[in-house]
Image: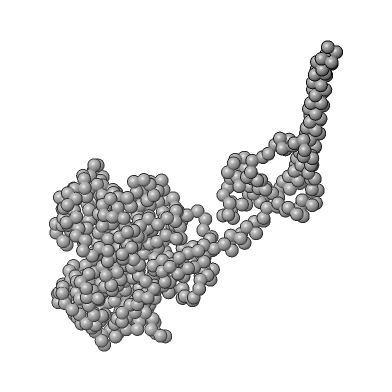
Amino acid sequence: MERELKLTMAVPMSMRSGDSQKTEKREQKRLTRQRILMVWSAITFLVLGTFIFQVGRNRSPQAAVLEDLPEANLLKSYSLNTDENPLANINQSNEPEEDPIAEITDNEPVETQVVPSEEEDEETNPTALPTQAELNAYANAAPITYYAQSGDSLGVLAVRFGVEIDDIKTSGEFLPNQLIPEGHVLFIPDRLGETSPSQKVFPDSEIVNSPSAVGFDVQAFVNQAGGFLSRYSELVYAEGSLTGAQIIEKVALEFSIHPRLLLAMIEFESHWVYGQPETPNQKAFPLGIVSIDRPGLYNQLEQAAGILGTGYYGWREGRTVVLTFKDGQTLRLAAELNAGSVALMHFYASQSTLPEWFEQIYGVDNFANTYQRMFDDPWRIAAHYEPLISADVLQPDLILPFAEGVVWTMTVGPHAAWGAADVRAALDFSPPKAAPGCERNYSWVTSVGPGNVLRSENGTVVVDMDGDGNEQTGWVIVYLHIGSTNRVPVGTWLNAGDRIGHPSCEGGKSTGSHLHIARKYNGEWVPADGPMPFIMSGWRAVMDPISLGGWLVKGDEIIKANLFGAESSQISR
């Protein structure tokens, strides 16, 4: 019994001893945690104190740098109290913070971190923001990688990007007015501020009356669509009554604007192609150009073609780099855009406010979507025809457009090729005559080169130099103000020097009998003073930006012309 009693009593004694040991271990852990908390508290107060002291000492210069950052175009302007601020998380890890106490175990020693002194921190971990001069230097040293597009030259690119020609770096050497091969890499400083989106929205070959328009039957398409346009007709000056399709074909040929583009613009604005105009304005102004004295389809298309051409060729020549909206607001165009996109942007900007324009160009129901629903993806079509002008294209040999030994006068240098489209592709020559005005003149206009006569009407003769019968392809010469008497008929093959007709005032506005001559290539008007200058009998056209006239230059000889005829000079072949 005694032995059993001793064993029985030994059990509770052993249990009390274990409880005491566990209590002591818990107390040790509690004390350890308290010591760790005290150490971390001390570290936290020390770091905060140092930070407050440092911020207070550097507050003014840091604030000045932050105010200048947006001007450097490297960082966006952010509120310092938002999560978007890129400066708010400098030197912070993206890893989640760990609880230092939770990581401590009974078998791991407690380690404390040594806080570096202020002097050591400045030497090993500099955090000072860069100066404005350093930011500007970096911005200037980080150029845009740009791939040349059809029609690009160094002089025009310098204007679009707002830089000097010498700032553009590339392999090879190019003259300022020389075409650069498409796809050639250039490095150009990024110095533009706010611009339009750089996303291209429309190809060049679907803006101008290019090879992609060959074989497109406007009348058949309009009839099949069956809308208001299929039943429309209008009296057009010097033409009589024309159907809607005939009006579109006329404007497309004369202004060299793609007929599919004109059809899509009509449908986008007034629903004439597939449906009916829904308002009086849509019926009177189917392109949305509200001009009380110029209603009707022909007037609308003529105005639209002029605006589109001004945007297209203004971009080509480096004269159009800013959009102006109908309320006077302006927007710089992104330098990476193409001429076709700028043409479309320029037209809708002239008729809209900036928010309206953005919806028309980039919105859900934008113009390009309408075009695709009617025809096809314009970029898919363009892939078969572009580039329209490549760097290896050369003008054929041409001679002056009048008989040898007869003295004519150059009256106007590079100026608008047709109507209101501001493309400086044409030259004017006046024949010898006893008195100014529109008196009948017996001098002959002669062909500058070989080709087939495609059009001969209303004072206009169009000669297709490649002889394929298409005005949309290859080199084409346009002669304007050719009198109806003795004018060469359609279908005639001409050689250089063959007679075309007599100069007159027929075909457009004119105050005196003269010849207006211009060139096209693959449907594009070719600027007379550009990468492919107008050269006849060795005389090269040069633009004079001061007098708005120009010259013909041949070696050391110069023939001057002025927009007002004040300095006109005579020339003979």
Relative image position of residue 324 (x, y in whole percent): 41, 54
Q: Is residue 143 visible?
A: yes
Q: Decide: is 77 above or below 430.
A: above
- Kindly identify the residue that appears in the image at 28 percent across and 48 percent down: 269
261 or 43, nearer to the observer:
43
Q: Quadrant of residue 4?
A: top right
Relative image position of residue 362 (x, y in whole percent): 39, 49
Q: Is 141 on the left or on the right of 471, as rendered?
A: right
- Kindly identify the residue that appears in the image at 17 percent across and 49 percent down: 226
Relative image position of residue 67 (x, y in whole percent): 63, 49
Q: Is residue 481 visible?
A: no
Judging from the image, the colouring scheme is one colour
Image quarter where the C terminus lies is bottom left
- Kindly identify the residue that appears in the image at 66 percent across and 45 percent down: 92
Q: Is 394 on the left or on the right of 37, as rendered?
A: left
Q: Is 217 on the left or on the right of 173, as rendered?
A: left
- Kindly identify the residue that appears in the image at 25 percent across and 76 percent down: 465
Q: Decide: is 262 above or below 536.
A: above
